[in-house]
Image (spheres, rainbow, N blue to C red):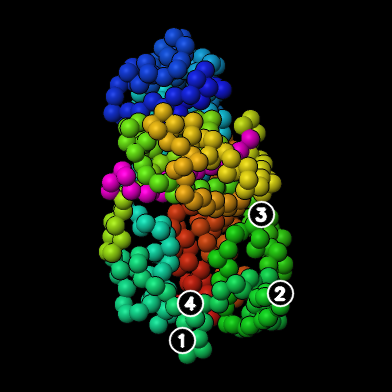
Amino acid sequence: VFFDREHFGSDRVVSGIGKRSWQDFFAAAPLSPQVRSDLIRIHTAHTDYLAQWEPAQKNELLKRISYQDFLLKHAKLLPESLPFFSGMAFRNNMRVDTCPAYTAARSAAPGFLGMELPGEPVFESDYEFHFPDGNASIARLLVARLVPGVFLGPQTPESIVSAMANYERLDTAANPTRIRLSSTAVRVEHVGDPRHTDTVRVVYMRDGKAFEVTAGNAVLACFNNIVPYVVPSLPEEQKRALGYASKVPMQYTNVLIRNWQAWQKLGVHWIEAPHGYHTWVALDVPVSIGKYECPSDPSEPIVVHMVRNPNAPGQPRKEQQRLGRLDMLQTPFSKIELEIRTQLARMLGPGGFDASRDILAITVNRWPHGYAYTYDTVGDPDVPNADRPHVLGRKAFGRIAIANADAGAAAFTNVAIDQAHRAVQDCLLSRGLT
């Protein structure tokens, strides 16, 4: 964890989360004796702070209050200790003030060691593998199967990472599947009455010009909020449902550094920064596959992955995400670069890192509408799943089906694949084929 001087008195990286006792960990942190004792208590005490409640009642209470409220009002955390938790991120940018206490408890957050709650953990991850290029390899494997000739020969998970794509083969008339890049759909509509027609018109823009194609069906696998603008003839209730979600702003920054000797000297491979511009900074996950070999020597260059979810503490989660998107869109690259260099220098400087010497390249990927919106028990109405906005919004409209992870209300690749399968079934149903 990087303790910054603005909130903790001095800049210091303290290593060993999960490797050393909490007493030793916090003893090395720049904390007052009162805050140190308080944080050790929250992390180690087997105390049921809701002992007066029955287990089922505890569940209901924890679902209706934030983790911050639980820590301050029930676990009696000192307000001066809260900064340690302020940058803690749960799934989809839920922070200490917006994450339901129930979700925090199921995620093994501090403060619940002495509390027995019925049910299973909300989320467990055994993150042992990813492709070096993330989900891009999955998309490339799909393209290799769908569009002959884009890659030379059959592709496997081992070969796809280093395989070269021939982009000119993506859109050839001889292939049954064609992928047309740089072609943004702006209008999708039925030709005639949606209840009886067998034709859909798609208008798209390419090189500043409008084109159109017709099809028997169309699947909109895009951001749900824009679907009503692309298909203005949708029923009004469905438009409102599609507009409900507030997607998570995501900024993934990748920094190529000359070597990772400073990380080795500090004894870390990832750093949480509760109040940093980027709250998560880590060396790239070491993956060697096929012809791709990850760096194995600290003297070699490596990519540092930095994550930022801009938000606005104190506001409801959906509003935090809206303000985070606004911040992201208004921030020039020059400010982001300054923040990157300053943050890495402050964190890694004691290990010998020099930002002006050791940073070789920076890429910043800004996704104002990043991860799919997920519901929570504090900010969203408690309704049956069938009445959730994502279920109402993904309903087929004539020959037009709706997919994407938004339609499953979860930001996972498998969810996007499941929703694609459902949307194809909707298309077949519209033709009377299933």
Name the residue that disc number 1 marks.
Answer: 175
Name the residue that disc number 3 marks.
Answer: 243
Identify the residue at horizontal 54%, vertical 56% (top origin).
406
Helix, strand or loop at label 1? It is loop
Q: Are marks 2 and 3 in contact (CB under 8 Å)?
A: no
Three-letter amino acid code of the residue under disc 2? Gly
Name the residue that disc number 4 marks.
Answer: 167
Q: Are marks 3 and 4 in contact (CB under 8 Å)?
A: no
Relative horizontal placement of residue 304, taking residue 383 as reference (left or right): left
State the separation of the CA atoms marked 1 and 4. 14 Å
- Please give the label number shown on residue 208: 2
Residues drawn in magenta: 296-312
**Residue closest to the eye, 169 or 122:** 169
State the separation of the CA atoms marked 2 and 4. 21 Å
Three-letter amino acid code of the residue under disc 3? Gly
Q: Residue furthest front?
A: 357
The answer to whether one can see residue 235 in this image is: no
**Residue closest to the eye, 189 or 17:** 17
